[in-house]
Amino acid sequence: MKKILIAIAVLLIIVAIFYLHRSGKKIPDSANLVYKGGDSMAVVKVLNVVGDSTVSWEDAIHKAVEEAAKSVPNISGIEVVNQTANVKNGKIVEYKANIQIAYRADGQLD
């Protein structure tokens, strides 16, 4: 009986660790740009943005970054999370790109 209780406790601990690890927020890989070359750790924030365009997904991404740059200083990188489109009569009429924008929260540039 004691071995069963210990096995259950170990299993619960493993599940808890796995859950905590999986529920953590991921900083985009492109945010690593702000960490290079310094001894102190930078504070990086991540902003979710949706860009749209009638031209292409690339244009939607560029528009999202340009719009965010008007109010968000120190953008260090982006990650494209998802790309979707609206279709009418068998043709794409609007491209959408969900991106994460990483930026330095402390206002410093590298």
Image (cartoon, rainbow, N blue to C red):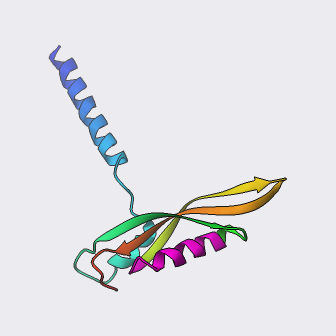
Asked if residue 106 is positioned above or below residue 9 in the image, the reply reads below
Screen quadrant of the N terminus: top left
In front of the other: 7 or 99? 99
Location of residue 47 by image quarter: bottom left
In the image, residue 106 lies in the stretch drawn in magenta: no
Left or right, residue 48 beside residue 13: right
Total residue callouts: 0
Give percent across and percent down for residue 94.
Answer: 71, 62
Farthest residue, direction bottom? 110
Q: Main secondary structure of the magenta part?
A: helix
Residue at 35% x, 47% y: name it: 23
Give percent across and percent down for residue 11.
Answer: 27, 30
Residue at 46% x, 74% y: name it: 77
Location of residue 74 by image quarter: bottom left
Give percent across and percent down for residue 70.
Answer: 46, 80
Residue at 15% x, 17% y: name it: 2
In front of the other: 78 or 10? 78
Left or right, residue 9 beside residue 36: left
Give percent across and percent down for residue 89.
Answer: 84, 53
In the image, residue 63 lies in the stretch drawn in magenta: yes
Farthest residue, direction right? 89
Residue at 55% x, 71% y: name it: 64
Q: Which residues are magenta?
A: 59-75
Screen quadrant of the C terminus: bottom left
Asked if residue 12 is positioned above or below residue 76 in the image, the reply reads above
